[in-house]
């Protein structure tokens, strides 16, 4: 798989995504309206780690108005931990939890005049599915059972990618603009130094280098090859809008077209 999609015109295309709709009731997380003017795909929380029907509806409507492709962002049902703690569950239970959350977002999306095109697991669930093939299979099978038209957006080079392909599900790979990487291709845990990149200039420079070489710098090792059709900028990070705006501007200035990985 190539690091970038390169059509015959040799114009580089890459998707820019963000995790959005992560508020709850009157409490807002991040500036979703601003982010939806910058990204091409939005991973919308669906009632597990965050969100509720009204938050989903409002975020979905904003996405539709901005022409942004929508994905479901299921996570552990752990709002207090924001889905960043592993909740012990059998793989089959994980599959049912994911299916319930995808279905919830699909129902609200129908009311909001848009559709859910893909699924991207959140937080601790995504990290577990990156290495645990049984969990990855459970997620893939849940996605396939809901709709053959749903794709999966997975962390590049993980078990979830392999599971999706094994179950004949369209799968796309992502890298993270604002997260550090380990030599094995996994993200640096948030509790460790180097986990987050806060400087927009540094983030943009790293991405441009990656898009040229296909190699991702890592903490404590040599750069590693990764594939990507999408770049994630976390919507809940401080300065997320400034980060996304700068990255988009720098990519565009370098001749990269920002476009959804799915129509």
Image (spheres, rainbow, N blue to C red):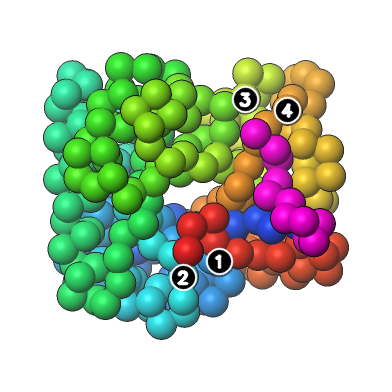
Residue at 21% across, 30% down: 94
Q: Quadrant of residue 238?
A: bottom right
Within 10 Å of the Cα at label 4, are there few (<14), some (14-19), or many (20+) other Cα atoms? some
Separation of residues labelled 1 and 2 (CA atoms): 7 Å
- Report the residue marked by disc 1: 39
Q: Label 3, on which residue?
A: 185
Q: Position of residue 120 (x, y in %)?
A: 39, 45
> Horizontal placement of 40 versus 94: left or right?
right
Measure the C-alpha gap from mark 2 to mark 3: 28 Å
The alpha-carbon separation of the residues under discs 1 and 3 comes to 24 Å
Q: Classify the position of the N terminus by image quarter.
A: top right
Vertically, is 46 above or below 160?
Answer: below
State the residue in front, 84 or 66.
66
Gap between marks 3 and 4, in whole Å?
A: 9 Å
Q: Give the range drawn in magenta.
A: 1-11
Q: Disc 2 marks which residue?
A: 68
The mark closer to the camera, 2 or 3, is 2
Judged by its main secondary structure, the magenta piece is loop
Q: Residue at x 20, y 31 (%)?
A: 95
Answer yes or no: is residue 248 visible: yes
Q: Label 1's element?
A: loop
């Amino acid at each position: 798989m190539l690091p970038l999609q390169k059509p015959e015109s040799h114009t580089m295309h890459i998707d820019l995504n963000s995790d959005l709709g992560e508020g709850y009731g009157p409490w807002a997380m991040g500036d979703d309206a601003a982010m939806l003017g910058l990204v091409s795909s939005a991973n919308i929380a669906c009632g597990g780690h965050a969100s509720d029907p009204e938050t989903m509806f409002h975020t979905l409507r904003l996405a539709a108005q901005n022409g942004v492709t929508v994905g479901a962002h299921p996570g552990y049902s752990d709002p207090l931990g924001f889905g960043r703690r592993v909740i012990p569950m059998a793989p089959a239970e994980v599959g049912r939890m994911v299916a319930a959350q995808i279905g919830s977002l699909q129902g609200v999306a129908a009311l909001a005049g848009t559709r859910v095109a893909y699924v991207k697991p959140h937080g601790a669930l995504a990290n577990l599915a990156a290495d645990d093939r049984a969990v990855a299979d459970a997620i893939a099978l849940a996605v396939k059972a809901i709709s053959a038209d749903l794709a999966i957006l997975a962390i590049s080079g993980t078990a979830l990618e392999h599971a999706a392909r094994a179950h004949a599900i369209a799968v796309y790979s992502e890298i993270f603009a604002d997260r550090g990487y380990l030599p094995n291709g996994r993200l640096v845990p948030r509790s460790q130094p180097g986990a987050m990149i806060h400087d927009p200039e540094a983030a943009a420079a790293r991405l441009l280098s990656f898009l040229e070489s296909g190699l991702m710098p890592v903490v404590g090792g040599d750069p590693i090859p990764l594939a990507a059709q999408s770049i994630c900028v976390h919507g809940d990070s401080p300065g997320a809008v400034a980060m996304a705006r700068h990255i988009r501007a720098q990519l565009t200035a370098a001749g990269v077209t920002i476009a959804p990985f799915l129509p």
